[in-house]
Each structure stands twice: as structure tokens, then as C-alpha cells.
Image: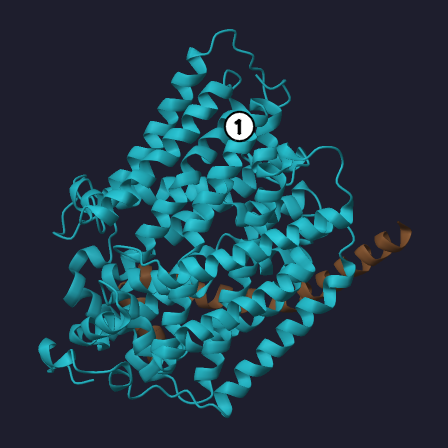
Amino acid sequence: MQTLREMLSNHPLWGLLMIAVLIWYTFVTLYVAVRGGMDVKSMLRELDNRNRGA
Amino acid sequence: MNPALSPSLLHSFTLSDLLPLAAFSLPVDGSIVGVYLLLTMIAGIFVRKYVGKVEDFLVAGREMKLYLGIASLAATEFGIVTAMYTAQSGYTMGFAGALPGIGNAIVMFVIGYSGFCVKPLRDSGVMTIPELFERRFGKFVRWLSGVVIVLGGLLNMGVFLRVGGQFLVVCTGMDVRYLQWMMTALLVAVCIYTILGGMLSVLVTDYLQFVVMSAGLLVVTILVLGDIGWNGLVAAVETHRGAAGFNPFLNKDQHLSLMAGNGPGLPFVISNTITSIAAVLTWQTVIVRVMAAKDTKTGRQIYTRTSFFFICRWMIPGLWGIAALATVAPATLDALARQMGENSGTLFAMPHYLSTLLPMGFMGLLIAAMLAADMSTDSSYMLTWGSVIYNDILGPFRRGVVNERRGILINRLIVACIGIFLLFFGLWYQPPGELWTYLQTTGTIYLSSMGVLLIACCYWKDANSWGAIAAIVVGAALPVASLVADRFFDNAAHNGIGEHWVNIGTYAAVVAAMVVGSLLKPNRNGGGLHANAA
């Protein structure tokens, strides 16, 4: 919390950007970990179907 | 390392003396790294059975969906080399060093949102940018574009292996004698799954690597913030870099000036903005995600939704670099530079700092994250430059239709040859000056002309083959001349003109060449993207 307060008061432009980076990146990592895995499965299934069809 | 040691004393120190606190434990950290490597290899090799056609090998059968695209683009565009040069920017320029990332993010979002160039490119159904150029400017321009793309791309990528190895040595305290073996083993592992599975292996491993890499980056950043504290980081930048450490428009003397050819300042901002536009439009490893996307809409969404990652890509290692600025004595960096045979030690500030910060276990996570970052970058770069060699450099010489199996075999051989080139180039070439400058200069060899050609191809009806050829020749000649001058004449271009003005001047000259060349050609036959080659 101390670091967070410092980020909002000392050079807040860079502090806010850093906070945004950490929040956004954490969220995207978790979300893409789940949805990306589903995309991998779907991609391999599509290719398998296509290769069998050919 | 005791900061009070005099430079003369440092000559007698070995690397292990300089890295007494590196906390890499073979049983704990080695196991973490080993599990990661094993999983990656299994996944990468497993998907080879889905490769049936050249299109599967080069663009994953165009079946890539949005979130896999985001993971893949993010993993590819972040390697150890990225962490090293962005951290170096943080060390040398403070927070202002993150400007290229901010510019890149804005440019990527705008281009993805508007569809500028990327929409006509994806709609055309081509696999590479030179393939599009053939439709407008003819076969020779396609071939020539392929040559400069591969030249710039491979020179750019040539330093990845060396820098990656240096990070591992400094961070883990590994004996420098094992550096070459470590680099070779890493490259061989990447080559195996890339050769077998092509883009499919790249995408699947990129996904795993994105997760591992992101977890490592986030955890280490929180540890760094906890160690130094925000106020400590800000104080370090204020003390060592002054106001210019927060405002990228100010030069080293804290003034707003167009004369700063190196370091921060207005030319730095202009140069990086231009590079960002060209890179987002034409950097083959970025644009291939648009080509491999399921449709144009997905390709554009990958751009808009990944854009903010480019700020993370500069801010996170940049913060590590600033933490190094707060803690690592310059004498230590000088000694490290001498040990590694480099001119400047600023590149090693971040890994040296992390070697003293991270406890056992976390070190393994960091190394696994960095290996993930590096492997995803190497595999994707090898494949995409390989696709240009197959499609655009060798393509015009092929007679008749090549069957799919033979096509895949040729692509695999090309990737293997790129791997061999990287191994030898990476071992002996030492770029002069700052790493980011070298990457920007080598990238400009093709970014300058390809960016201008793509815009002209899509939106200028009078553009023709003369203009295209002139732009390609000028765009390649100036950065190569700059590299040669720096290499053989004591950094003549770097010190004389300044790195940023070399970059800006190249783009200006390329635009002039494109316009003049196109206007000089008699009986111009323009008329948009689908006109016959002039």
C-alpha cells in the first residue's frame, strides 16, 4: 500500500501508467491463458477435420 | 561487488567474482527450467502431425483465432533481447526510455482500429508483403523486397543469441565458458520444433511461453517494486538523469532541442514514432499475425487488443533497468563489460541487479520466463524470415507447381539454414553502440522502404516499379553505410550525424526516392492495388 501511495503522489503520470501496466497485464495474462487454450484446441480440431477431408 | 574498487583492480576479477550473489540453484531452479523446457518441446513436436500443406506450415492454415493471436504476438515481440534493450533504455534514460513503447502502442491501436494498410493487405489473401507488391510493382520488386526483408531481419536477429546468452550468464552466475554451449543447445531445441511443426508449433509453444513469460515478468516486477520502492526509483532517475529522465522531449542537457542526435530529445521521439509506424505495418513477425488470422476483422482485433502490451513491454524491463540504476555501481558494469568483451556495461545492469535480488525458486521462474520469451521470439523470427525466402526470393525461380510435401521440406531446410547462420553470426558479431540503436538501424534496412512501399501500394495510384526499386535501394543503402561507418571508422555515423538523424534521414530519402522514381517513369500505369504490374 505504501508503494501504491507513492506511485500516486510522486510523478503520478508514470506511477499511474505503471499501475495500469500491472493491472492490465495481470488481467490479460489470466484471460488469454484460458481463452488462448480454447483457441489452440479449436485450431487443431479445424486442421484435423480439414486434413481428414482432404 | 564493492563500488569502491578501482577500475585497475577490476581487470583481475573473473565473472564469478563479480557475481557472488547469483542465487541459481541447480536442484530447485534447474528443475523449474527443465519442466518448462520439457513441456515446450513436447507441445511443439506433438502438433507436427497437423501440418499437411505449405499453408499450414507458414500461416497455420489461417486458422488462428483472436486470443491465440494475442498470446503469440505478445510472446514473439518479447524476447530476452527485448528485456535487455528496454532495461538498458530504463538505465540510460530513466522513465523517458519507455517512449518507444508508448508510441508503438498508440500506432498499433490506431492502425488496427482504422485498418490502415492492414485491411487491404489481409483482404488480398497474400502470405507475405512482397507477394502483394508483385501485384502492383511486378516480380522484380517482389524479389528485391524479399532480399531486403531477409537481409534486415537476419542482421537484426543475428544478435539475439549472443545477448540472450549474456543475460543468462550474468543473471545466473554461470561460467562464461558454457555460454556458447548454452546458446547452441537453446537454438537446437527451438529449431527442432520449428522445423517439424512450422507456424503450428510456433503458435502452440507461443501460447505456453506467453503464460510462463507473463507470470515471471509480473512476479519479478512486484519484487523489484518491493525492493527499491517507487520513491527510490524516482529518486534514482532524478539524481542520475534529471528532468530528461521523465520527459523524453528533453535532451541530456535538459533542453528542448532538435540537435540531439543520440540519447533522449526531440529527434529520439520523431525517430521512434516513424520506426513504430513502419514496424507495425511491415515487420514480418508482427504482420504475419494478420496474415495468419482467421479473417480481416480478427487480424485487426489482434492489433487493437495487443497494443497496450507494447507499453508493458517497455515499462516492465525499463523499471528493472531503473532499479539497477539505483543500486548497481558503474564500476561493476565497466568490469562486466570487459569480461563480456563489450564496449558498454549498461546492457548488463538489469541482469546483474536481478542476480542479487531474486531468491532461489524465483530465479528459476525468471530464467524459465526469459527462456520462454527468447524461444518464442527465435522460433517465430526463423519461420517468418524463412517464409519470405521460400515465397519471395526462391519463388520466382521455381518452375511449375511444387507439391505440398516438397514445399514443406524446402521450408524446413530453409529454417535449418537460418538456424546455422544465427549460430555462427550470433557467436562472433558484436554490435557497436547501444543494442536498441543497432536493432533500429538494421530494422530500418527494410522497414523504411517496405513501410513506404506498402502505403504507396495501397493508397497512391501513381506509384510504380521505378519508384519502388529506388525506394528499396535507398532504404537499404543508407543504414548499411551507417553500420559500415560505425564498424570501420570509429562510430563515424553515430558520433558525426547521430543515430536518430540517420534513421529520420533514411525515411525521408526513401519517400523522396519513391516519389521521384514514380514520377520519372514514362507511361505510368498506376491505378491502385489491383492494377497490373507496371
- Which residue is nearer to you in this view: B514 or B240? B514
Query: In this view of the protein, which residue sits in the foreground, B464 or B230?
Result: B464
Please provide percent x and percent y for residue B21: 31, 88
- Which residue is found at the position 28% from the left and 73% from the top? B323
Q: Residue furthest right?
A: A53
Tell me if B505 is positioned left or right of B50 in this view: left
**Which chain's residue wears label 1?**
B
Q: Position of residue B512 (x, y in %)?
A: 36, 23
Which chain can be seen in brown? A
The chain shown in cyan is which? B
**With respect to residue B180, does B452 lie above or below?**
above
Relative horizontal placement of residue B312, taking residue B318 as reference (left or right): right
The type of residue carrying mark 1 is Val
Q: Which image quarter: residue B39?
A: bottom right
Quarter of the rendering containing residue B122? top right
- The kind of secondary structure element at disc 1 is helix
How was this image coloured?
Answer: by chain
Q: In this view, does B317 lie above or below A51?
A: below
Quarter holding the C terminus of chain B is: top right
The residue labelled by disc 1 is B141
Work out which residue is located at the far top of the displayed protein and give it. Answer: B523
User: Which quarter of the rendering shows the N terminus of chain B?
Assistant: bottom left
Pick the front one: B59 or B350:
B59
